[in-house]
Image (cartoon, grey):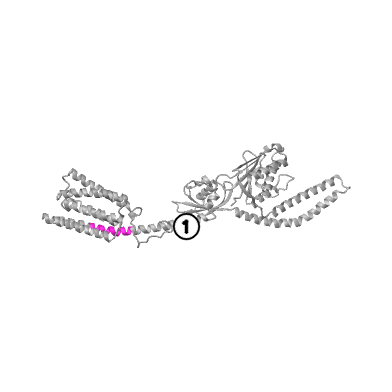
Amino acid sequence: MQPGTRATTLDEKLIPVFLHEDPWNLLRLYHVYRFTLAGALLVSLVLDYSNVKLGQHDPGLFVWLTGTYLLVAVFSNLASYFQWPDLPVQTVLFVILDIAILLGLLYSSGGIGAGFGILLLIPVLIPHLGNPGHVSLLLATLTGIALVAMQIWLQSQNESDTSGVMHSGLIALFILLISLASNRWIRKASAVASLAQRRGVDLANLSQLNQSILDKLESGIVVVEGSGAIRHMNESAWDMLGQPGNWRSKPLQQFAPELDHHLQHWLHTICPRIASFDVRHQNTTEMRARFSQLGNQSRRATMINLEDTTEQREKLQSAKLASLGQLTASIAHEIRNPLGAISHAAQLMSESQNLDKADVRLLQIIQSNARRMNLTIESVLNLSRKKTPNRERLALKLWLHEFRKDFLLQNKLRIDQMNLFIEPADTVIEFDPAHLHQIIWNLCSNAYKYAHDDPKYLQIDIHGGNPTHTRDIMLNVMDNGRGMTEAQRQRLFEPFFTTSTQGTGLGLFMSRELCLTNGATLDYVALASGGSCFRLVFAHHR
């Protein structure tokens, strides 16, 4: 039944359980039985078995009826193949012919003593399976009456004992009782089948509704079998996991190894309690995964609820920048005015002609540190002022080509000292161009300053694109320098942390903050070959 069609009620129609799929199947099976029986009777007639009492009362009638029965069997098979006439007509018509022919065969064989009177039960039951009701019971009753009447007629002609009449009466009663029982049983079975059909439609509609609701949810839903294979994944989860192809019944580990690692940990240590984990899918997409058990222990499955934390991270970043703005405003008011007075006084003193070399050196130290302090305040103020980034769609490869020309020119580097590789070449990101320029320039400048003592040995590689099984775009800025120690990596993005006496320690901190402001992330990745790698993961644009 298709969704939206009206379900047939029990009062309207009882659908037989045996004919639930194709009502012609049982009738065709019965036609095969009829053809087999007619063939068996013909073979027994030709071979003339002496121990079988067939046609002893009227051999000519038996031969004629056997041939007729074979023709009826052939015609009935053709009629069911072409489905003409209709099913109810064929059922009643051929059953009546069967009963009449079988009664004739019994009569020509001397009555119930021939031993195949019980074969009348099969055609009597066929109408019950097709249309249980009073017609079927009437047909069974008339068959029993005809059987008894035929036996009485034969007994009156032979003037023998009445045991045959009693035998035929018992068979007629048996046929009637079986017909009554079959009628009730098939009615109940049909009612159960019809109810099961309606319940199946209801369950299918409910399942379709649940599927539609899951597919429309903004949060991702993944259902994983106990074997680790994916049973279901809604559209949001499919998008978060990088739109994997042909994922049905495939292992979760194949598409999301980090998520599968947390799943195995949860299964072995926490299950069945619900637990949540922060996951970085393919080292790019940040999400929060919540694991809960479905089903029982014998047929266990796991539902994974995936939540994209990008929006939450951006809200926290906005709140942090707002607090930073208030702090820097206070710093500007409380520190910059006295700092300006100190710097101005030092400048005036440096113009005096009565200073010795030691005093001049002290004034230079005062002015240098005043400038450094002012630069630090300016950097923090610049960061706090940029609360709302002006994001634009940028063709990453073209933008980086322009950046490379500018950076190489200003730092007097050879073109082969900076390589670009972006795949796919048409990769597009959403980012504030000024922020992106400040971030990449700072990363490349750090490589220029700290990677080698002599810049002519510097090699910078910028690789980016969309990795397999992830929706986010990644950009790696790598150099061939000394790399970072473990202690330095731990504090790399802390504000005011620097390994140089000339720096403010805010470059990498500001770069990460600008990335977060644009919905991206910035991290350091240790390279086995040495050197440093800074990885930007851009936010997924909708």
Residue 76 in the image, given as x and y percentages of width and height: 27, 50
Main SS, magenta residues: helix
Asked if residue 186 shows in the view, the reply is yes
Asked if residue 160 shows in the view, the reply is no
Please say whether residue 249 is one of the residues in the magenta stretch.
no
Identified at 19% across, 44% down, the residue is: 46
Q: Amino acid at mark 1?
A: Leu
| Left or right: where 200 falls relative to 385 | left
| Left or right: where 315 falls relative to 346 | left
Identity of the residue furthest to the left in this view: 159
| Left or right: where 267 falls relative to 424 | left
Q: Foreground residue, 443 or 409? A: 409
Residue 12 in the image, given as x and y percentages of width and height: 35, 62
Q: Secondary structure at mark 1?
A: helix
Identity of the residue furthest to the right in this view: 354
| Left or right: where 118 falls relative to 445 | left
Q: Foreground residue, 257 or 401? A: 401
Identified at 20% across, 54% down, the residue is: 103
* Start-end of magenta stretch: 175-189
Residue topped by disc 1: 209
Residue 390 in the image, given as x and y percentages of width and height: 66, 53
Residue 508 in the image, given as x and y percentages of width and height: 68, 47
Q: Foreground residue, 246 or 271? A: 246
